[in-house]
Image (cartoon, helix red, strand yellow):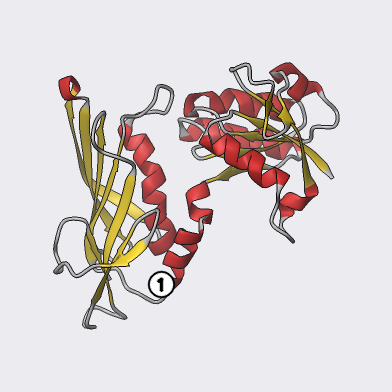
Amino acid sequence: MLGAVVLGIGLAGQARIRDLLAPLPGSSAEKLSIRGFVSRRNLNTHQGVSQISLEEAVSRQDIHVAFICTENESHEDYIRMFLQAGKHVCVEYPMTMSYDTAEELWELAQKKGLILHEEHIELLTEDYKQLQKDLDGKVLQGGSLHFTGEPLKRGSGFPAFSGIARLTWLVSLFGKLSVTAAAFEEDSAKGYSKMTAQLLTSNNKTPNFRLEEHERALKFGFTLLIATGEDETSDNDLSSFNLDRRTKAGAPQGKEGQLCF
């Protein structure tokens, strides 16, 4: 049994604690036992788990794995700290704010014989697994993807960086993407920003991507409107997908927010 500690007690950290306390039967989480959590807030306990200091988490011999669920900008320092202490690390996406730093930390983990795992938890949800099944064998023809959310919190990075988390859905589903054009608009007075990008797949299809952030009205949303077909000449059935549910939609092809297959 490996002892684990969770750093950060936001939504991701709370989910980690919950899953460590009640692991799925047969999952690797059954081999982990949570020893405590670390937070800047004084919480004492959460879900029956005791709060411990960062120094204790790093030094305790019965803690072998750290789950890092803090703001993005702090990931690098925490990863390095726990690797240097000889502990395995699982970090929420993104690992770091730059590729060079991530590569450096990978090399450090390898040198020390430790596991450094970056996890994009959205790709493990039941909705996403079902989406993979529904799109199996479908061919991407084009279209667009629209994501909306509140403005980035301090320490999260810049819009193009946060948008990568959304793009990993497309990469996971359809393979390598490249960017052919991009634009950014911002209205600070209204707390609004918009980033758009023109993408290119390996088979020269051109899906669009749009990320909007607004301090009011917009809630977290990730929507794919999909026309599915076995190839370019097939009849298409349009379906709508988001992070919470999947529902059939009858919108015609070519509408904003649509991905065609």
31 versus 39 height, above or below: below
* Residue 142 in picture, x, y percent from top left: 22, 64
| Quadrant of the snapshot with the C terminus | bottom left
4 versus 50 height, above or below: below
Residue assigned mark 1: 134
Viewer-nearest residue: 179 or 158: 158
| Quadrant of the snapshot with the N terminus | top right
Quadrant position of residue 144: bottom left
* Amino acid at the residue labelled 1: Asp
125 versus 229 height, above or below: above
* Residue 204 in picture, x, y percent from top left: 25, 64
At x 62% / y 22%, what residue is drawn? 39
Viewer-nearest residue: 83 or 247: 247
Quadrant position of residue 38: top right
At x 23% / y 38%, what residue is drawn? 195
At x 24% / y 31%, what residue is drawn? 216
Q: Secondary structure at mark 1?
A: helix
Q: Is residue 41 left or right of residue 250?
A: right
